[in-house]
Amino acid sequence: MRLDKYLSSYAGMTRKEARQAVRRGVVQVDGSVVKSESEHVETGQQILLNGSEVQAEEFVYYMMNKPAGVITATKDARDKTVLDLMPEVKREIFPMGRLDKDTEGLLILTDDGALAHRLLSPAHHVDKVYEVDYEGELPKTAVEDFAGGLDIGERRITKTARLELVAPGRARLTISEGKFHQVKRMFAVEGTRVTGLKRTVFAGVYLDESLAPGTYRRLTEVEVEQLRIGGNHG
Ligand code: URA
């Protein structure tokens, strides 16, 4: 494929912008600057635009260790967004689901709209695991209460959830829905208050704990496959 077509297909540019970028000398193929937009390139070659790799996949998938203090949105006039932390990514990705501003941990970002739609549809029960710090005393019946479903003010009680009591003030919760502030509301109706929340698993994909908060990496092929499997049942 011609270099300008490659860039317009995979870097979110128009053909004209692609041509201009090539002529400006900001495009490299396998380590060398190429100034001819009609240069033929093939998959397997490394194409860099302004130093960032432009991949030829149909879709891209990333995991971020979301830090507290940024919002799960693509842009915002006031707050810093998760996409503001990924300026090198040229594709039009968006977050798969939402974590609150003060929640940390696993967030998947992609441009695969169909997969995101499947995984986020209420008809699917995609497991998500959260590490929860809380204040106050949970009732003795908490594990059964979470398993049996809680009335958090929605039309229906929550679906069965698995609560593990890890240490005083610390628990692990697995839920399969994603209602607004769901974990915080579940803990609130049990008489406690969430003081820290971190997601560690989404649809069978585990947070890579070597990612510092605010950093991200591509999903591996195995992880992408895991998401696809996660998106196909439930
Ligand atoms: N539940 C919450 O209350 N907040 C989140 O960010 C995710 C789940």
Image (spheres, helix red, strand yellow):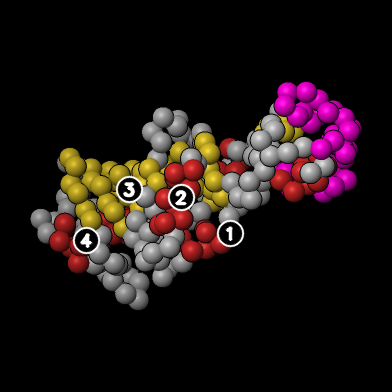
Magenta part of the chain: 11-40
Q: Which mark is residue 221?
A: none
Image side of residue 22 versus residue 83, left or right: right
Q: Is mark 3 within 8 Å of ligand 1?
A: yes
Q: Position of residue 136 (x, y in %)?
A: 20, 48
Estimate the x, y position of residue 56 in percent, counting from the top left.
67, 43
In the depicted view, which residue is nearer to us: 132 or 19?
19
User: Reading the chain from its start, which is encountered first: label 2 or label 1?
Assistant: 1
Residue 16 appears in the picture as rendered: yes
Judged from the image, the secondary structure of the residue bearing numbered disc 4 is helix
Look at discs 1 and 4 and give the one toward the viewer.
Answer: 1
Q: Residues within 10 Å of mark 4 (few under 14, many from 20)?
A: many
Distance from disc 1 to disc 3, alpha carbons, whole Å, reads 25 Å
N-terminal of the pair, mark 1 or mark 4, is 1
The tag earlier along the polypeptide, 2 or 3, is 3
Name the residue carrying label 2: 225
38 vs 114, left or right, is: right
Give the label on residue 130, or none.
3
Q: Tag 2: residue type?
A: Glu
Residue at image point 41% right, 29% down: 210
Q: CA distance from mark 2 to mark 3?
A: 22 Å
First in sequence: mark 1 or mark 3?
1
**Amino acid at circle 4:** Phe
Residue 31 figure quarter:
top right
Q: Which residue is mark 1?
A: 113
Number of numbered tags placed on the structure image: 4
Is residue 69 in sight in this rendering? no
> Spatial distance from mark 3 to mark 4, Cα to Cα?
14 Å
Task: Choose the circle earlier in sequence order: 3 or 4.
Answer: 3
Judge the density around disc 2: few (<14), some (14-19), many (≥20) Cα neighbours within 10 Å: some
- Please name the residue that numbered disc 4 is placed on: 146
